[in-house]
Amino acid sequence: MGLDYFLLCLIMVSTLDGSLTNASAQRPLLGMNQAELTEWVQSQGQAAYRGKQLHQWLYAKGVRSLTDITVFPKAWRQGMENVCIGRSDIHHRSIAADQTVKFLLRLDDGQIIETVGMPMDKRLTVCVSSQVGCPMACDFCATGKGGFVRNLATHEIVDQVLTVQEAFDQRVSNIVFMGMGEPLINVQNVVGAVKCLNQDIGIGQRSITISTVGIPGQIRRLAQYRLQTTLAVSLHGSNQALRTQLIPSAQHYPLTDLLDECREYIAMTGRRVTFEYILLAGLNDCNEHAAELSQLLRGFQSHVNLIPYNPIDEVDYQRPSRKRVNQFTDSLKAAGIAVSVRYSRGLEKDAACGQLRASKVNA
């Protein structure tokens, strides 16, 4: 994977960010704030207070058609059948033993994306996708094996959260942008979705995590929005050579440069960075890798999330033993690195970290 591929990724940052291949001229209502909805209802000849009603029905009730909003005049509703709300259809769902639910959602243009609802105690976390497919081609990840189609629009991201909330009949408490796609190639729509989820649905920004493998300049760009979200950076390698083996695009983004940009992010936002590290047996989980990682992150305002590898069909990487995971964890702790282990949910239904793909239905 050479320079041409990496340049394509950078071109997509500038040309696809904010784009959608839907030919419809009407902007979907989902994603609009109350002021925008008020302006829209007034353009339809309705009183301004209808904007507040529409906002409530969109975000609190999850309405899928204006014809279902019973507080609206019947005569007006009957002429609004073709107004685009922006909700997608559930193409398929599968439920794991731990009650994690993977949803395959069909978008307006027929593309399929995945989102995952993960209930635990009184919390409900949604793993959302930011793209159809992913261009980063990380060697251990199922999504990257299927290639890239397009960015998701703001309403397509917000819809995933409403779909999970509706299916569980429970308020969503946490959101992680760790589904299909690289969020920082779609910054404009991801930030738009974060603001909508925060301001219109009421999910605190500090309960939202945006994950990235690192795109040059894009962490700095995200910092300029001054969000209070958590930034999770996928390292997966304790040195440049190992990281490049697992993440092809890393050959054009030196680890030292990535970490420098993370330091800038911390300085600009006052928020610490979480580093994600997938443990692959015999490849990046040895004592020397723990020592290298500790040296890289010494003095960093950060936290390390260790993720034992979740298997996919296309490659033969292995998950390390729990003993090996514990040894790696203890090495980091001994070096003063804040660390935790995340054992993924929904593993047997291909709903865990690194297993999401649009084409596979695992019933």
Image (spheres, rainbow, N blue to C red):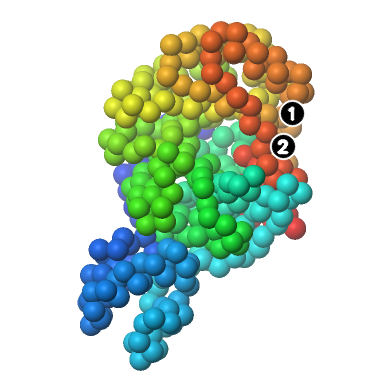
Placement of 254 over or under 155, stated as above or below: above
**Residue under label 1:** 318
Placement of 304 over or under 138, stated as above or below: above
- Residue 145 location, quadrant: top right
- Tell which residue pokes out farthest to the bottom in this image: 75
Q: Position of residue 307 (x, y in %)?
A: 63, 29
- Residue 84 location, quadrant: bottom left
Please name the residue shown 26% across and 70% down the image: 38
Specify whether 12 is left or right of 268.
right
Placement of 293 over or under 95, stated as above or below: above
Q: Position of residue 350 (x, y in %)?
A: 69, 47
The three-letter code of the residue at mark 1 reads Gln
Specify whether 333 is left or right of 24.
right
Q: Is residue 97 visible?
A: yes
Disc 1 + disc 2, Cβ < 8 Å: yes
Please name the residue shown 38% across and 24% down the image: 262
**Residue under label 2:** 311
The three-letter code of the residue at mark 2 reads Pro
Placement of 236 over or under 212, stated as above or below: above
